[in-house]
Image: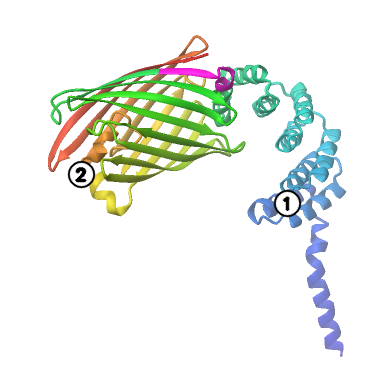
């Protein structure tokens, strides 16, 4: 009986020791435990227990209130989240993380005017905060105050606040402000061995920003193999959400002389991801005569300071690999100022269906190996014009053990109005 008594005492001590020890933890330690529980174990209930205890010990510790607000917003307990964010701002009205967390929650729940009020309050204390300024610009876009949104974005770009969302939003706002655009382009392609005559390609397109996104109609002309042809295309970039958007393309030519694929189509899903990442997954379809070809593509990119670094792969199902192979490429862009001002370099292996001047070579089953490199320069002229100049080199095995070089130069002009 005495032995059982001691066993019960030991068991009681064992069960109560963790709770007893936590009462002696500092608020900083409890904050760390809460972050670990939330981010590593995805245990929000346990994280909130640590935060409750920390707030009881240190009621003026604003970080605890802010993190409690964030967890409640993730759990969609918005009234509770507002309570904790507001208390954090009462404790420290200058705390920018509290303003950002609160305004972000309100923005995602379409409470735009209240979110703008919180943003403005935070910017009074931290006028150089890139995160608060970017959020304020997004709020203005949601309120359809595009001029105000664009002014903030331009300021962020000049301040070199290099966030992926800054440049993406700049392009979106500029598209809205200038609902119409006309693009003209010309490409010259020279072959040292594979073909006797150079290729000429030109296009003109008209795009208009609509409620679903940018919609563009395009007319392409090409002279290849001493043959002429026209191709018609329509494409769009429908918005899906604040994170996702898509790309849809459809093309057709009435000429069945091999200058263009008779049919082409494309679909991609894009995502603007946290920590300045972006990604895409999609498919491409080309039909040359009675020979359809499906290609699958994936892309990942990362913004770092003034740089955008990206890599892409095109994969063809195994029953088509003898015809077209696989294409890989990597690129880097260095931004000089605005969303359209950059210098880019690229290198890769294989021919891709998105190389408009070169995709026709995918129909040649003898395309065995191809290495490529390119340069691109793009510059805004005035407010609404964009000049693009590019050059590319391809070294291609067009017959077994027989290689040739291909040189391309192109120029394009975009006018928005």
Q: Position of residue 175 (x, y in %)?
A: 55, 22
Residue 61 in sight from this viewpoint = no
SS at mark 2?
A: loop
Q: Is residue 43 shown left or right of residue 400?
A: right
Residue beneath the point at 74% across and 53% down:
47
Q: Is residue 90 above or below residue 144?
A: below
Q: Is residue 33 shown left or right of residue 405?
A: right
Front-most of residues 207 and 26: 207
Residue beneath the point at 57% across and 34% down:
239
Which contiguous range is marked in magenta? 174-183
Query: Distance between the Cα atoms at labels 1 and 2?
Result: 59 Å
Mark 1 is surrounded, within 10 Å at the Cα level, by few (under 14), some (14 to 19) or many (20 or more) other residues, namely: many
Residue beneath the point at 78% across and 46% down:
68
| Callout in the foreground (1, 2) | 2
Quarter of the image holding residue 234? top left
Q: Is residue 285 shown left or right of residue 127?
A: left
Query: Mark on residue 349?
Result: none
Quarter of the image holding residue 201? top left
Front-most of residues 144 and 39: 144
- Asked whether the beta carbons under mark 1 and mark 2 sit within 8 Å of each other, the answer is no
Q: Which residue is mark 1?
A: 34
SS at mark 1?
A: helix
Q: Which one is earlier in the sequence, the residue at label 1 or at label 2?
A: 1
Q: Is residue 360 magenta?
A: no
Mark 2 is surrounded, within 10 Å at the Cα level, by few (under 14), some (14 to 19) or many (20 or more) other residues, namely: some
The residue furthest front is 254
Q: Position of residue 107 (x, y in %)?
A: 72, 34
Q: Which residue is mark 2?
A: 365
Q: Is residue 21 above or below residue 373?
A: below
Residue beneath the point at 69% across and 52% down:
38
Q: How is the image coloured?
A: rainbow
């Amino acid at each position: 009986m005495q032995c059982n008594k001691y066993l019960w005492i030991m068991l009681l001590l064992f069960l109560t020791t963790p709770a007893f020890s936590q009462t002696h933890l500092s608020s900083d330690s409890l904050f760390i435990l809460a972050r670990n529980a939330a981010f590593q174990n995805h245990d929000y209930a346990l994280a909130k227990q640590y935060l409750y205890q920390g707030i009881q010990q240190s009621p003026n510790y604003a970080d605890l209130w802010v993190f409690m607000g964030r967890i409640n917003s993730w759990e969609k307990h918005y009234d509770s989240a507002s309570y904790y964010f507001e208390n954090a701002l009462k404790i420290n009205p200058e705390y920018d993380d509290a303003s950002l967390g609160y305004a972000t929650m309100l923005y995602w729940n379409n409470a735009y005017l209240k979110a703008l009020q919180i943003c403005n309050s935070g910017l009074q204390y931290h006028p150089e905060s890139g995160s608060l300024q970017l959020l304020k610009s997004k709020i203005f876009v949601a309120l359809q105050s595009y001029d105000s949104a664009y002014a903030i974005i331009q300021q962020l770009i000049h301040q070199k606040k290099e966030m992926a969302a800054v440049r993406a939003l700049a392009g979106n706002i500029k598209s809205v402000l200038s609902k119409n655009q006309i693009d003209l382009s010309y490409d010259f392609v020279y072959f040292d061995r594979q073909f006797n005559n150079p290729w000429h390609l030109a296009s003109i397109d008209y795009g208009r920003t609509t409620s679903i996104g940018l919609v563009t109609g395009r007319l392409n002309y090409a002279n290849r193999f001493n043959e002429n042809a026209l191709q018609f295309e329509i494409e769009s970039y429908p918005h899906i959400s604040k994170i996702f958007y898509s790309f849809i393309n459809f093309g057709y030519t009435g000429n069945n002389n091999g200058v263009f694929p008779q049919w082409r189509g494309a679909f991609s899903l894009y995502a603007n991801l946290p920590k300045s990442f972006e990604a895409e997954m999609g498919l491409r379809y080309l039909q040359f005569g009675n020979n359809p070809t499906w290609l699958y593509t994936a892309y990942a990119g990362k913004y770092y300071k003034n740089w955008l670094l990206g890599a892409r792969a095109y994969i063809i199902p195994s029953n088509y690999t003898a015809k077209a192979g696989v294409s890989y490429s990597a690129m880097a862009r260095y931004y000089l100022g605005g969303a359209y001002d950059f210098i880019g370099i690229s290198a890769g292996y294989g021919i891709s269906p998105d190389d408009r001047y070169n995709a026709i070579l995918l129909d040649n089953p003898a395309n065995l190996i191809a290495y490529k490199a390119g340069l691109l320069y793009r510059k805004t002229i005035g407010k609404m014009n964009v000049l693009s100049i590019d050059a590319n080199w391809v070294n291609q095995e067009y017959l077994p053990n027989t290689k040739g070089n291909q040189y391309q130069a192109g120029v394009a002009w975009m006018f928005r109005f």
